[in-house]
Every structure is written in structure tokens, then in C-alpha cells.
Amino acid sequence: MWRCSSSRVRPALDLRLFAPVVCGTVVDPLEQPTTSTDTQRAEARMEGKIVDGPTVRLSSRLTFFHKLVFPTMWILAFASGTLLLSISRDPTAHELAPIFGLVTLLGGSFLSAISFPLKTVIANQDGIVVGNFLRQIQVPYDQIASVRENKWISTRLTTIWLRADSGFGQKIKFQPYTHRTFKFWKDHPAVVLLRERVQAAQDAGGVSANVT
């Protein structure tokens, strides 16, 4: 017997004898009401906005060093060397100053293209969390158009192209975590995982496209 308020309720015979009883009403476990949050996440999963899988850090833990520390120190060192050579009284030093200046400009341009734009990237069920050490944004998997990895650079610089502009623009660059292998022609595991999740989101959302 079960007690509901102040009255006793006798459940009628039913094939679902072991189903939970709420105030005398037999409730089918398969028909249990869900919360609005569960419903929203189920709908998002059907639309490809949520992909099952653990949270994984895709970017290197040395991103801060490669993004700010190393390029800043390198540029300051060569710029200081160029200045010292320019004001030196040694004629040979004056001849080297233009060369140092050119190297500083070329190196600074290169670092500005591959180091300063680096972002931290973490993959979770809802998409990727992108940050620049000042703020973070969430990018759903279905908003990722392509993932391209540069295998000619030892750090495997990877570029994520989005379908539309985000808080960090339409192009996101990150350096994957360290993965030592002699098979340099193979894709980095972080790139493989991200492509698989993006493809799964596209398949669930009905988007016919291959992520490369």
C-alpha cells in the first residue's frame, strides 16, 4: 500500500506491477517526464549541435609561451641588436645593421602570422571553446567548415575555418598538443578527433560535407 496525502490508495492489478507509483497512478518508466534541459539537449543532439565525447584539450599547454613569450623576446632581441649595430662606431657593425634590420622585419612578419594569432582550443560536447587568455567563446561543431593542418611546420600549426564570423573572426589558429611520431605524413590526433566530431555533427544535422 502507498499513502498519498491522508488517504490510502490501492493500486489496481496491472502488468506493470513493478513500475513506480506516484499518488496511486502507475507510471511507465519509459514515459517518465524529462526536464526542459534534457529536452533541449536531446533536440540539440539531433540537430548536430551536441556530439557525444569527453572534453579534450586540443591545443598545446605551451600556447602562451609560443603565442607571446617567444615571439616578443625574439623581436626585442633582434630589434635591440639592430639598434646597437646602428649606433656603433665600428664600420663593420654599420654594415651588419641593415642585415639585422631586414631579418627583424622578416622574422617579425613571420611570427605575427603564426604565433600571435594562436588560440587555446578545447573540445567538448557542445563544440570547441576558443580562448586568447583574455576571453573565451564557444563555437558549435556545425559552424566549422574545415580543419587544415600544416605538416611542414614541426608544431603542426592548424587552422579552423568557420562558416561565419565569430568573436575571433572566421579563421582560428592553434598549435596542437605535443605528439611525437616519425610518421610526419599522418594527421595529428587532435586534428583527427576534431574532424570526426565535426563530421558527426554535420551528419546529424543533415549537412552533406566532408571536413578536411
Image: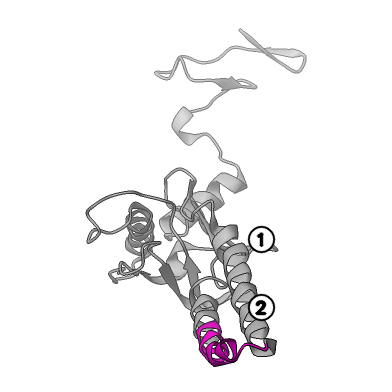
Q: Residues within 10 Å of mark 2 (few under 14, many from 20)?
A: some
Residue 133 got which mark? 1
The answer to whether residue 186 is above or below residue 57 is below
The residue sitting at the top extreme is: 1
Q: Please tell me in which quadrant of the rendered image residue 141 appears.
A: bottom left
Q: Which residues are magenta?
A: 89-104
- At label 1, the amino acid type is Phe
- The residues bearing labels 2 and 1 have C-alpha atoms spaced at a distance of 28 Å
Question: Taking 131 as reference, is 32 left or right?
Answer: left
Q: Please tell me in which quadrant of the rendered image residue 185 appears.
A: bottom left
Can residue 195 be seen here? yes
- At label 2, the amino acid type is Ser
> In what element is the residue under mark 2?
helix
User: Foreground residue, 51 or 135?
Assistant: 135
The answer to whether residue 64 is above or below residue 152 is above
Q: Position of residue 205 (x, y in %)?
A: 38, 64
User: Foreground residue, 86 or 110?
Assistant: 86
Is 100 part of what is drawn in magenta?
A: yes
Q: Position of residue 148 (x, y in %)?
A: 35, 70
The residue sitting at the front extreme is: 90
Q: Residues within 10 Å of mark 1 (few under 14, many from 20)?
A: few
> In what element is the residue under mark 1?
loop
Q: Earlier in the sequence, mark 2 or mark 1?
A: 2
Residue 4 got which mark? none
Q: Which residue is mark 2?
A: 80
The answer to whether residue 134 is above or below residue 16 is below
